[in-house]
Image (tube, rainbow, N blue to C red):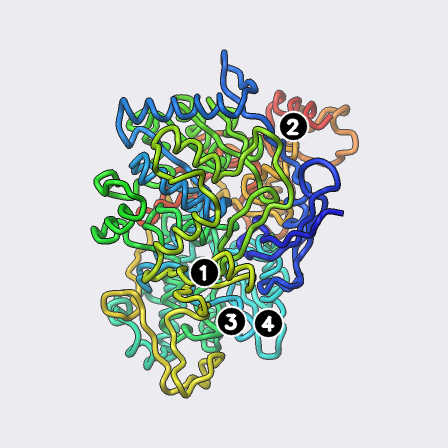
Amino acid sequence: MTDLVPTTCMRCAVGCGHVQQAPDRGYGLGSVRGDPSHPVNRGLACQRGVSETADPDGEWLTRPLVRKGGELVPTTIESALERAAEGLGTALEDSGSDSVAVLGSGQQTNEAAYALGKLARGGFGTRYYDANTTLCMASAVTAYYDAFGSDAPPPTYDDIPEAETHVVWGANPSAAHPVMFRWIRQSADDDDSELIVVDPVHSETAEVADHHVPLEPGGDLALARAVLARVIETDRVDEAFVDEATVGFDELRDDLPDAAEAAEMAGVSMADVDHLTDALEDPTLLYWGMGINQSVNGTAAAGALIDLCLATGNLRPGSGPFSLTGQANSMGTRVCSSKGSWPGHRPFADPDHRRAVAETWDVPVSRFPDDPGPGPVGIVDAIGDDVEAVYAVATNPVAGMPDTTRVREKLEHAFLVVQDAFRSETVEYADVVLPAATWGESEGTTTNMERTVSRVRAATETPSGVRTDLALIGDLADRIVPDLFDETPEPESVFDEFAALTAGTPADLSGISYDRLEAERAVRWPAPAPDVSAGYRYYEAGDAGDERTTTDDAPADESWSFYTESGRARFSTGEARALPEPTDESYPFTLTTARRPDAYNTGVRTREDEPPTARVSPATAAAIADDLEAPADGHMSDEADEGDEGRQYGRVVSRRASVTVCVETDDAIPDGVVWLPIHHPDVNDLTLPDVDPRSNEPNFKQCAVRLEPPREQDVRAVAEASA
Ligand code: SF4
């Protein structure tokens, strides 16, 4: 038997500790299960995390590939690296720093993400660098900076049992974060506790909630403002907290809409508005997810949720705003990757911080770009203009970006290096493919959504030709910008360099080391010293207080401090923009996309040949039934229909593309909405590339579509794929 190796699940940002074991022979993982000694999850794990780690469905990349005569053909790792370095290096030499774009990921270790940022900003000097974390968390990040002057949620998992109200807004943690949702449910099951779900869809989370508030897609900001107006009208403002610890409340109050009008805009009854208003009086954790962030109003809506916490004094242990992060290391990427800020959340434009980073990296500060760039959609826009070559690491833009037809067209015009563990859709557009190690094969650290850092470990070796992300980044750096890394970058020394660079910053990890993680298993930042691990942020209970107090028995000497100029939290000023693509006669339905419980991200590890399932309400199904059934070829042929009885096929059509789907009737979906899973590579052909102007996060959640009968050739293709 091989050894049990403790590690951290890299499937979602709950950050459960796993133990994994190599098989007795060969590569891969023999077994994976929850780690009872890990302080985050104490042995709990979900089926998806275990199965996608131990036995993923995707096609593993085991050999480097280069494009020859239009085909990807196997080569040696040295040849692949030479070709990649030549393509990227030529662009840099001929056309300057901004000619190379770098796309990173929330699924890399901290060490790989840090090294990639160092290469992109300090080696290439490009402004065209971002990560797929901007596609999901950027609006929450911007709202945190607006409110607190610093990123990351104030609460931690320790606050979940202390809360009495749990509001889950635009998120489905039952499907996306199963272990965390178990804690939320346990707490909400206590006497006098409650789980309220705000979501247009009656999701798996809403199914078990005490109260579901269905709202119109995109009605989040209006509803949050309606609730705030009622908080004020019903004298539920925590005046003492607002006076002592915040700025901007009077300006916000003066601008608030009438509660009834705002509720009507959101499509929500005043009874539901008052239910939320009442519930916020108790210690409340307000969780939100992609339903809020992935919108042109994402920053404004996330800010409005934070406003609700500020106005009601829900910024103490057992309460507060808590964004739910999707990808396993989205939080770490935000701290270490030099994407929107320098390591430790150092402000990008600040000359002193730029100098400090440049000195650590031993590069001229003049090499750094002036601004952090236009976000992933803007980077795609720049291909064929500024950008000539792209280096994509552990990300799948051809499936994960909005309006993917355009992404494909753009990538065809770039020299593309793809570094991945699996044969994703983006690999098919690559000029060079660098096969990378995956979770059971890599050493490093990851940071979960509540700021806890823990080790990722290798239980098995990689096939020859496959290297870790960190090693490949070092290999490319060696060939293009020698001396950027002193030697072959090793995970521990890279972590030490990164952690030292965070000393004295709001995201201080300088008290964390591999030795400490070995001893304690997991440490939450800010951790400015080897004996400090953070809890609730911005809050001090004072000498008389108990750390685990609630609003009702708050200590008299509690205090708050924030990283804003005034030292106080700021209420937001965000205003609603119209949805970029409202429904009309030609496109009468709203498309929304969301997670399935058994898959993650672009579904590379859970590939199915089936077309995606579009869920619609019975009324919507009835309205389109005649259209879908009209042509004889709207159903599978007898041959293909075998074992597949009653399955109805159709086509979801947006202004950008059309996608063949299975149509399923489901009471959980509101009338007029078409629901599709995010995990299918076809789905983002339909979605909109409009972005939130503050965060650059795309408006994935609402676009206008219609449903049509499937074309005969689509049905045939589905039949052939299923045969
Ligand atoms: S909840 Fe997330 S981190 Fe935990 S086992 Fe499941 S996928 Fe992994």
On the image, the x and y values in percent for residue 129 come to 35, 38
Foreground mark, 1 or 4, reads: 1
- Image x and y of residue 513, in percent: 47, 58
In this view of the protein, which residue sits in the foreground, 424 or 33?
A: 33
Residue 221 drawn at (x, y percent): 39, 58
N-terminal of the pair, mark 2 or mark 1, is 1
**Mark 2, residue position:** 634
Could you tell me which secondary element the residue under label 1 belongs to? loop
Q: Which residue is the site of mark 4?
A: 187
Which residue is at a point 34% across and 62% down the rendered structure image? 506
Provide the residue designation for mark 1: 512
The answer to whether residue 678 is left or right of residue 18 is: left
SS at badge 4:
helix
Q: Earlier in the sequence, mark 3 or mark 4?
A: 3
Q: Amino acid at mark 2?
A: Gly
Question: What crowding class fits label 4: few (fewer than 14 Cα within 10 Å), some (14-19), or many (20 or more)?
Answer: many
Q: Quadrant of residue 582?
A: top left
Lower sequence index among marks 1 and 4:
4
Question: Is the residue 97 above or below the residue 521 in the image?
Answer: above
Q: Name the outermost residue toward the right.
A: 643
